[in-house]
Image: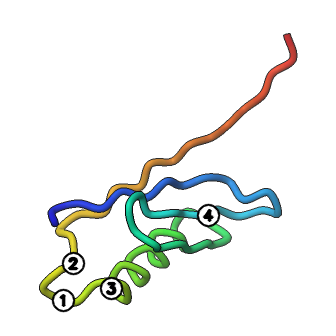
Amino acid sequence: MSEIVFLVEDAPEGGLVARALGHAIFTEADSYDELRQQVRDAVQCHFEVNERPAMIRLHYVKDEVLAA
């Protein structure tokens, strides 16, 4: 596998959550920098060394609602 994609969103209670697309990997953190490290750690724990993706893509989605 060359790449794994995480969907990153603001957590309702504060901080950020990240979910891997196509894999059962979930992590959360208080800041974006902390989330980067948490995602790296989660990927290392989930995959064996020879199965780990070469790249991790973080896709940050911010849902915003505006009054019309």
Going from N to C along the chain, the mark reached first, 3 or 2, is: 3
The residue at the point 41 percent across, 58 percent down is 21
The residue lying toward the viewer, choosing from 47 and 39, is: 47
Q: CA distance from mark 4 to mark 3?
A: 18 Å
Say which residue label 3 marks: 44
Q: Could you tell me how many numbered marks the image carries?
A: 4
Secondary element at image label 2: loop
The residue at the point 21 percent across, 70 percent down is 53
Residue type indicated by callout 2: Arg
The image position of residue 17, as x and y in percent, is 61, 64
Going from N to C along the chain, the mark reached first, 4 or 1, is: 4
Mark 3 and mark 2 residues within 8 Å of each other at the beta carbon = yes
Going from N to C along the chain, the mark reached first, 4 or 3, is: 4
The N terminus: image quadrant: bottom left
Q: CA distance from mark 1 to mark 2?
A: 6 Å
Position of 26 compared to 5: left or right?
A: right
Q: Which mark is residue 49?
A: 1
Question: Is disc 2 surrounded by few (<14), some (14 to 19) or many (20+) residues within 10 Å?
Answer: some
Q: CA distance from mark 3 to mark 1?
A: 7 Å
Say which residue label 2 marks: 52
Say which residue label 4 marks: 17
Q: CA distance from mark 4 to mark 1?
A: 25 Å
